[in-house]
Image: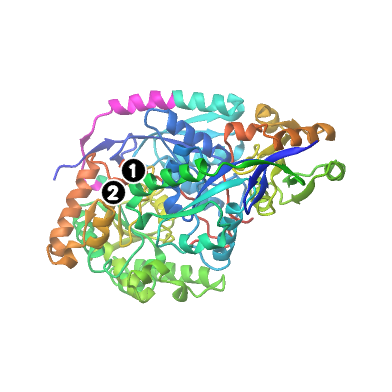
Amino acid sequence: MSITGFAHKGRGVGVRDHQLILPSVVCSTHVSRKIANEVGAITFAHQNGCGIIGIDVPGVDNFFIDLANHPNVQSVLVVSLGCETIQGPELLPKINRELSRLLVIQESGGASGTYESGVTQAKQLRDNFKSEKAPLDKLIVGLDLSRDIPALSAIKTALTNAGFEVVSENEKVVSEHNLSKLMSAKAQVVLSFPDENQPPTGFPLIPVINIASTSPLHMALASEFDLVEGAKVEEIIEMINAVANGQKTKSELSGIGEIVAPRSVRSV
Amino acid sequence: MELTGYKRADGRWGFRNHVLILPLHQMLSSAARDVEKDSKGAVAVSHDWSQVIEKDHQRIIHSIAGNATNPNIYATIFLRLGTPAEDEVINLAKTYGKTKLIEVSLSEAKSIDKLKEIAIDRANTLLTEAKNEQRVAAPYSAMVLGLECGGSDAYSGITANPALGVASDKLVAQGGTSILGETMEILGAEHLLAKRAVTAAVGQQIIDVVARYEASINYEGIDIRGAQPSRGNIEGGLSTLEEKSLGAAKKAGNAQFTGVLEYAIAPSKPGLYFMDTPGHDIEQLTGFGAANVNITVFTTGRGTPTGSAVMPTIKLATNTEMATAIPDIIDLNSGTIADGTQTLEENGELIYKLIMDVANGQLTKAELGGHHEFNLSRLYGSSL
C-alpha cells in the first residue's frame, strides 16, 4: 500500500503537517502555548533550557534540534526568553533553516508583544508555505517496548516485510523516554506497548498507536487504546498504513502525551 | 495596613481561593489543561511524573501533595488513573491540611472525554462555592512570603534585592514568615548568613546545606563556581558567583534566620527561613508552593514572565531600562534606587505595600497574563 505524506523542505516527507512552537526554555512555554492555541500549532511544556549543567546542556540542545528537524514538522517558531543557557539565537542556525523563525521575549516587548508577533509569524509560516503532497518511499515505524511482547520477532519481521523501516526502544515501564528516543530516530508512526501499570501514551509530533495488554488498568482504559495485544499483524500493518495516510490515532484525538526531554543531571 | 484573607479550617490563611486541577500522571496533563480552558476559572498544572518509583520519589510526592494543599487553594481536583501510587500522594496531601481534595478517576470515567466532562462539572461547582467565601481580617502571621530572584544583573544586589530585604524584615518583625530559597545563590555568602542564625546549630545547618549542594554538583564532575554566573548574568554585568550570591542574599534583609527547610517542606512557626532549593526559577516556585508560601516576590534584572498556579508572584525590576521595555511582566520598578529618585527604604516600603495589596486581592502581572508554570524538581535527573 502506498503512503502519501507532506513534502517538508529539508526535513523530508512527513506523515503529519505540524507546525511546532518550540520554547527554548521553561520561561517561554506559556507564551508558546498561547501562540500554539491561537494558530492550531503544537507545543509542549518542559522545564529545560536554563539551570541545566554538564551533559544535559548538549543533550537538551540536541533534543530540541531533533524535534525541530523531524519530518512531521512543517515549520518551526522558536520562542526564547533571552537570558537562558540554551540561547534561541544559537539554536536557530543548528536547525533546518527552511520555515524556521525566532522570537526573543526580552527583545520583543515582553510576553504580550511576543504573543502578538508570534501569532503573526506562525500564521505567515503556515499560510504562505503550503506543504505539497508527496509519496513516502520508506516509513520509519518506531516500537515503544515498555513491556515484554511475546510475538515481538514476528511483528518485527512482518513490519519489515511490509516495507517499513523499524526502529525500537526498550526501556521498561516509562514510555515517554522511549518515545523521545524514537522521535530522535525520526520515527514517523509509533507502535506503543505500554507497561501493564501505565496508561496509553502519546507524543504531539508523532501519531502513536497504543496496543493494550490484558492488565486491569488497560482493560479499564480500553476505549483509549487503538488495538489489543494479540491483534493480527495484518491488522497492525493495515492500521499503520491508514494512520500514515492521515487517520488519527486515539491519542491524537484525545491529545494525551507530554514531550519529555531526557535529563541526566539535577537542575542547579 | 489591613490584611485580609481566607481562613482555612486547619488554621492556615490563603490570599487566593483557587480551584486547582492537578493530574497525577503526565498522561493526564493535557486533560488538566483542557479542564482549565473549559471551566469557569480553574487553574491547572502540567508535569512529567509517571508514577514510577525513582530515586527522587519522596521529593516528587511532597511537591505534588504540598502544592495540592497550598493555603491559597480552596479545592484541588486530582485527575487520576486509579492506581495505588496515586493513593500515596493523596494520603500524604490529607496530612498537610484540610484543603478539599476531589478525585476524578479515568478508570471510572472510562474515557478522557468523560473524565474532562466530570472534572469541568466539579470544578464549576467548586468555583461557585469558592466565590461565596468571604475574606476576613488576617494577622501578619498569616503571610508566608517566598523570596526569589531570576535573571540577575549587576543592579540586583544594589536595588531590588536589598529593597525586598527591607520589606521582608518588616514582615518578619510583625510576626510573618519569609523564606529565602536558591542554595546556589547563597554559595559564597553562606558564612555571612550563618552568622545571622538564631542558634549556632541553625548556622551550621546553613553551612552544611550549601556544602551538600556543592558536593551534589561536584559529584557530576562539574565545578559550579566555573558554571556560574550564567551567561545571562554575565551579560547583565555580574563577574563572579560570589558577587551574585552576596547580592542574592540581600533579599532576606538583615533579620535572624529561625531555621533551615528541606525542599518543599513547610515551616512550623513564623520567622525567616532558608530553604534548600535549586536556583531554577520554576523548580523553586514549586518548592515554595508546597511549603505553604502564599505570596512570592521575584526580583529580575533581565525580565521573565513566569508565575505560579498557587501563589501570586510579584515581579520587581532591578533596573529602569528593563522595567520600561517590558512593563507587561513587571509589577514594581526598583531601578529607581540606582536612578537616585528613591531611597532603598522608600522603595522597600512600596514593595511592602504592594505585597499587602496583592494579598488583599490585587492581581499581579503574572496572574493577569495567565503565567503558571510548574516543574517537579529532581536531584538525579529523569533517567531511572
Q: Main secondary structure of the magenta part?
A: helix
Disc 2 secondary structure class: helix
Q: Give B17 or B301, whichever is nearer the viewer.
A: B301
Answer yes or no: is residue B147 visible: yes
Q: Earlier in the sequence, mark 1 or mark 2?
A: 2
Q: Looking at the picture, which amino acid does disc 1 mark?
A: Gly
Disc 1 secondary structure class: loop
Q: Position of residue B336 (x, y in %)?
A: 17, 62
Occupied quadrant, residue A7: top right
Q: Is residue A138 left or right of residue A207?
A: right
Q: Position of residue A103 (x, y in %)?
A: 42, 54
Please rate how many residues cluster around mark 1, counting C-alpha atoms within 10 Å: few if below 14, some from 14 to 19, many from 20: some
Q: In the picture, which quadrant includes the N terminus of chain B? A: top left
**Decide: marks 1, 2 in contact (CB < 8 A)?**
yes
Q: Is residue B342 left or right of residue B335?
A: left
Please report the residue visible at 51 percent of the width from the left and 28 percent of the height from the top.
B116
Q: Give A83 or A260, whichever is nearer the viewer.
A: A83
The stretch in magenta equals B122-141
Q: Position of residue B41 (x, y in %)?
A: 37, 31
Please report the residue visible at 34 percent of the width from the left and 25 percent of the height from the top.
B129
Magenta stretch: includes residue B204? no
Chain bearing tag 1 is: B
Q: In the picture, which quadrant includes the C terminus of chain B? A: bottom right
Chain bearing tag 2 is: B
Q: Which residue in the structure is indicated by mark 2?
A: B328
Answer yes or no: is residue B264 visible: no
Q: Give B108 or B99, whichever is nearer the viewer.
A: B108
Q: Which residue in the structure is indicated by mark 1?
A: B369
